[in-house]
Amino acid sequence: MTTDEAQDKKPIVSERDFYDLVDNTPICIKAFDKDGKLIFVNKGGRDEHSIKDTDDISKWDWLGTVKEPYRAAAWEKFEKALKGEPSTVEFEHTPEGSKHAWCSGTLSPIKDENGNVKSVLFYSIDVSSLKVAELAAQEREQMFQTLLDSVPLCIKWFNAKGNLISVNKGGRKEHFLENLTEEEITNWDYMGCIDEAYRSQVKESMTAALKGVGSSFPIKHPPGTSEGTWCQSTMLPVKGYDGNIKYVLFLSRDITDEKLIGEERQKSEAEMKQKNEELEIFNKMTVNRELKMIELKEKIKELEEKSHP
């Protein structure tokens, strides 16, 4: 072997340099042998888990730093890595087990030249801030869903593409959807519960809402698709923090009774108007009759006076 060939085969980074690089990386890196025995924890991991340099890391219960609800999943992913399958896992730490609340980790099997697993690297990063923000967002969304469910209205919830996401409790009850799953709800043909004569209005209002313009309009339900017949509806665009449309809410309030009362009132008013018109005609006829009677009496009187001078 020539000097140049030997130089080519010489590692660019020495084993010591690589060790120092890994040890000083500000993330937690754990290494296990092929039997799953912990053989190395870098400085970032020792600092995170309060492990002293003099501690015997082989006796450290790394899985015990993971909260109980997440241990089974973490161990399952670890066993897969020992069999040669890389994976990722997210978990919450116990307060005493880590300085970080949440971590996201990757388990990478290291194989020899024959393809056999000889060790496993488990490196994880702190995602506490992201997780707190994610949980807060989930909590806000849950509160929003709870609020929607508590409102005595039918509320259909659409994404920015106009696809149905969910229907609140009031809407499920009104349209007989209480036994449907969330997935079945997303596939529900909500236009089928709208009378054909009003569907174009709903489509136009949805298009406008997706562009940021809200609207209100009445709709009629076909028999058998709703507990009521008439609803007063509002299509409401909801924007995200970036100002773009995030959701569209389709709110409907049952106005069947109001509609019936209104129709009865209109019917009564029409009947009253007709009676008034008939009475007016009768009055005119009566007045004309009286006038003619008076006129006739005067003529009779004139004739009598002429016949008896």
Image: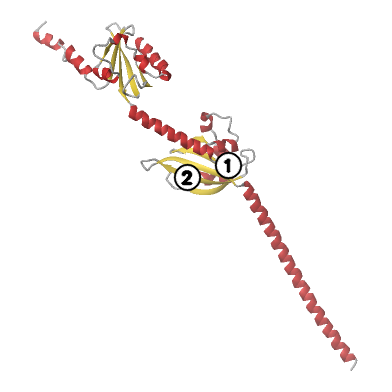
Residue 295 place in picture, x, y as percent: 80, 82
What residue is disc 1 on?
194
Q: Is residue 279 left or right of residue 84?
A: right
C-alpha distance separating marks 1 and 2? 18 Å
Q: Quadrant of residue 123?
A: top left
Question: Which type of secondary structure does the marked residue at label 2 adopt?
Answer: strand
- What amino acid type is highlighted by mark number 1? Ile
Q: Residue furthest right?
A: 308
Q: Is residue 64 left or right of residue 272?
A: left
Q: Residue furthest bottom?
A: 309
Residue 193 place in picture, x, y as percent: 58, 39
Q: Earlier in the sequence, mark 1 or mark 2?
A: 1
Q: Is residue 23 left or right of residue 194?
A: left
Q: Within 10 angstroms of label 2, few (less than 14), some, or many (20 or more) residues?
A: many
Q: Nearer the viewer, residue 208 or 50?
A: 50
Residue at position x 25%, y 16% in the image: 42
Is residue 170 positioned above or below 180 on the image?
below
- What amino acid type is highlighted by mark number 2? Leu
Residue 107 place in picture, x, y as percent: 33, 16
Visible in this render: residue 40? yes
**Quadrant position of the N terminus in the picture:** top left
User: Which disc number belongs to residue 236?
Assistant: 2
Residue at position x 31%, y 20% in the image: 124
**Quadrant position of the C terminus in the picture:** bottom right
Is residue 214 positioned above or below 129 on the image?
below
Q: Quadrant of residue 26?
A: top left
Q: Nearer the viewer, residue 35 or 207?
A: 35
Residue at position x 10%, y 10% in the image: 4
Visible in this render: residue 110? no
